[in-house]
Amino acid sequence: MASSTGFLDRHGDEILKTWASEASRAASARGLSDVELKNLMPICLAALTGGADLKVVMRHIESHLSDRIRWGFEVGEVVEEFAILQRCISSCAASAPADERPSPDELARIFLALQSIMVRTTDSFQMHMQLDEQREKRYLRQLRTLADQALRTPGAPLGEHLKAMLAVIMEAMAAQCAALFLYDSRSELLVTRAAVGLAEDELQEIVTSLDPATVTGLMATSEEPVAIDDVATTELVVSDALRSSGIHSLLGVRLPRRDRIRGVMYIGTRAQGPFSVRERRRIEALGEGMTLHLENGQLHAELRLRIDELEAERALRERFTAILAHDLRGPLASARMSAQTLVRLGDRAARPELVARIERNLERVDLMIRDLLDVSRMEAGQRLPLNIDWCDLREIAEEVVQDLEAQYGPRFAIEADGEFRGMWSRDELRRAVWNLAVNAVKYGRADTQVAIRLARRGGDVRLSVHNFGDPIPAEHREHIFDVFSQRRRAPQAGELGLGLAFVRACAEAHGGNVEVESATEEGTTFTITLPFDARPHQK
């Protein structure tokens, strides 16, 4: 019988040929070139014959394993290559002539040496895997640290925080560029929020749709990572900046992979070719980490906004309470002084003007309290209670003007043709018109009139109150009918800030609405639109 060394020397080429044929059909060979598949086994076979130093063999195995891990191979697939080699040696030994066949002891020594290489390979693979996992954990920890820093410095630009996180992801993926697109639900488009690496400045300007015909659209509509092997030849729509950047391959992932979309993240490499299973899994893990930090950032921003709103609301309520106390104290003090004067005079003289002053001031107090109670109902989600009956809106407007002229003089003009009778709540409409008219006097120019106009429009009636004065800024117009909104200016002395809120509540309770238009030349106009019959809207 031949020695193990002589047997392997004579039959080495035959063994390797048989091994290559079987190994090429194994799962471990998928996606490998012929050179990548066969680069290790000749060295291993030489080590079994004593023709190669074991340390040299292990260096080659380390390199081999590094490639296999990078391409996403599992340890079983790597060990299978050695198992196939053992079967090929055993088969060749069984079919060799008797004088060339190794003895059972010699064959056992070959297999023992091969088993030793397999054990070392397995141990080395596990070590590589642990290092790879530690590397991934390190990058995820860096992302978490950057996200924590962003939360602690809310004043810093969001784009700078995102760029720092993308730089970590680019390094973790050994890529040359990375980009993050966030979904804008209003426009239903993907908008670049950060980019790093090659074509960094050009990628900042990208806006794209969710159309799967685009690179980012395909990534956004897929729950699995999407790989583009060659940007230059892909039929998908790619930005010119990316095509000319020197980037060849892209790997992108939807954020999050399931549920409501938040955005898309991708990395790009100069190398052209497929991405490994491990690279796909890693970008998934990094994408999940990025999604978590984006969600935490949004929740933190929403919480800060809510805190700011509550603080502004508290300050406004405190200011409102102080003004309410001030405004109530004025008419009550006037009514008390007038009453005391009447008591001192007794029956000696009739003073109708004092009685009228008392009634007027008590009516002001009553109006303020009723506005407060009704607006509180509205804020609690309750509908304004109405006592609906036939009434004439022109007649209501004339009564309001008559009362206000006693205080403000002939500042008012009513423009209306005919009667405007409808099924409404007289008291609430009177208060609404009063509030609008007082508001117009307060903010209108003293040398101009306040015009109250009535007009029909289809099945509705429109009551508008117009004055000339400084226009209402657009940011105030949007929320001018709100109560206790931090976006409105704080109320001043003599202004509770409830009048316009009550006007809206009154209009909506009748099934109508109120609008405001304001410009420098045209002045300011508040318009209440009401159906002629409010009864159907009370159900």
Image (spheres, rainbow, N blue to C red):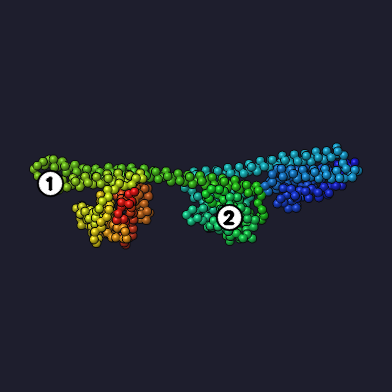
Res. 17 in view: yes
Tell me the residue at 77%/39% (across/down): 116
Tell me the residue at 77%/43% (across/down): 83
Which mark is drawn over residue 218? Answer: 2
Front residue of 537 and 509: 537
Residue 210: image quadrant is bottom right
Task: Identify which amino acid the numbered label 2 is placed on.
Answer: Leu
Front residue of 430 and 316: 430
Left or right relative to 291: residue 469: left
Task: Identify which amino acid the numbered label 1 is placed on.
Answer: Arg
Helix, strand or loop at label 1? It is: loop
Mark 2 neighbour density, 10 Å: few (under 14) some (14–19) many (20 or more): many
Say which of marks 2 and 1 sits in front: 2
- Furthest-right residue in view? 99
Res. 447 in view: no
Residue 382: image quadrant is top left
- Furthest-top residue in view? 105
Helix, strand or loop at label 2? It is: helix
Left or right relative to 248: residue 111: right
Label 1 sits on residue: 351
Quadrant occupied by the N terminus: top right
Marks 2 and 1 in Cβ contact (< 8 Å)? no
Front residue of 340 and 530: 530
Mark 1 neighbour density, 10 Å: few (under 14) some (14–19) many (20 or more): few
Location of residue 281 in the rendering, given as x and y in whole percent from the top left corner: 62, 47
Q: N-terminal of the two: label 2 or label 1?
A: 2
Alpha carbons under labels 2 and 1: distance apart: 86 Å
Left or right relative to 445: residue 265: right
Tell me the residue at 82%/43% (across/down): 90
Location of residue 143 in the rendering, given as x and y in whole percent from the top left corner: 56, 45
Tell me the residue at 28%/60% (across/down): 455
Which mark is drawn over residue 368? Answer: none
